[in-house]
Amino acid sequence: MVLDLTNTFIWTTCSNSTKHHTIPSSSSCEAANKPGNCTIGSKDDCTTELFNPVSRKCGSGLVTFTTLTTNSTDGHNPLYAVNVTNITALCALKKLLELLPKDSIGIAGLASSNLSLPLQLSSRANIEKQFALCLPASGRGVAIFGTGPYYLMGMVERNVSSMLKYTPLIKNHLSSSYYINVTGITINMQSLQIPETAFLGGALLSSVSPYTILREDIYHPFLSAYSTATQYIPRVTPVKPFDLCYDSRNLSSTRMGYGVPGISFTLQGGIYNWTIFGANALVMAATNAACLAFLPNQTVQNVPMVIGGFQMENNFLLFDLEKARLGMSGLLYGVMTTCNNFNYTYP
């Protein structure tokens, strides 16, 4: 399942729709037919319209009940399998999987909506309305639903819960996705000359957008400032879709990735910044080409910026829906661990 922070449903493919019985008119059916990215489907047979966030295509889905099997955990290890029954899910045709990663069978929507995975697990399994997401650069990461503690292995086992710093999750009346209030950007501790009003609307968090997207009035001064701050590094021809690429053979390495200027998003209140170090700033786009992993867009989901999956990699994020806040660890390389280091062995 593709974990999608902006999707409101759990949906997967069904080889034969006749095996899946429709749900009659009910609260589940009504919730599934609230407006979203696609046209509303028919309530008569309880179908709704689904959205593939990668292909940007819509398709019809049949609302059904299913059983979800997952693992309980004490925060250190998985303990035993748990079956969660009466989960409302949607059954879609296989063609809706277009452009999703290989072997994907559907989407696990993580947005703050009644039919998303976190809220259904909260109500069906009687756990708190919060979840942790730790996306790896490669290999296997971890998603944990409910309260901590949350431990990652490393030189020593670390309770990541104690490392988190928080910023409010802000509401957007048009969406059940997650937004944080970014008020400015600094590069190498120098603030960009962008008015704070340019960031109104908040930054959308997206696990399916590969890279951070900035509206053009923010992107161009950002690109210019980063180019100036890295003028000492030899360039190579930009690799699409990126605008600024460096010869990776001339980049130094540090514990936090390539030795390049840090990028910081100033968060609400100015007390804490989300700092992007080299590991989350530059991506290897071709042989010897390390490119600035930020992209421009004229209109970005009606918000000034979208923080993409690459910038989230190896950052432990806690979405606390009860307290409407986001907990952030910062890049885990700083404490000698990664998102690959949850201990998946049974005790």
Image (cartoon, rainbow, N blue to C red):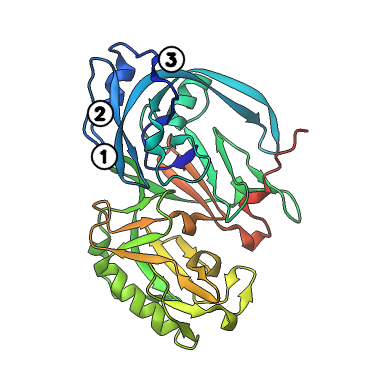
Distance in Å between CA atoms under marks 1 and 3: 27 Å
Q: Earlier in the sequence, mark 1 or mark 3?
A: 3
Return the residue nearer the eye: 16 or 211.
Answer: 16
Tell whether 216 sits left or right of 55. Answer: left
Q: Residue at x 39, y 20 (%)?
A: 17
The Cα–Cα distance between marks 2 and 3, rounded to whole angstroms, is 25 Å
Residue located beneath label 1 in the image:
37
**Nearer to the camera, 95 or 212:** 95
Checking the image for residue 52, the label placed there is: none
Q: Quadrant of residue 71?
A: top right
> Of discs 1 and 2, which sits in the foreground?
1
Label placed on residue 19:
3
Residue lying at the far right in this picture: please name it. Answer: 347
Q: Could you tell me which secondary element the residue under label 1 belongs to? A: loop
* Residue depicted at x 22% and y 29%: 40
The x and y percentages for residue 48 are 28, 26
Q: Which residue is mark 2?
A: 34
Label 2–label 3 contact, CB within 8 A: no
Amino acid type of the residue tagged 3 in the rendering? Lys
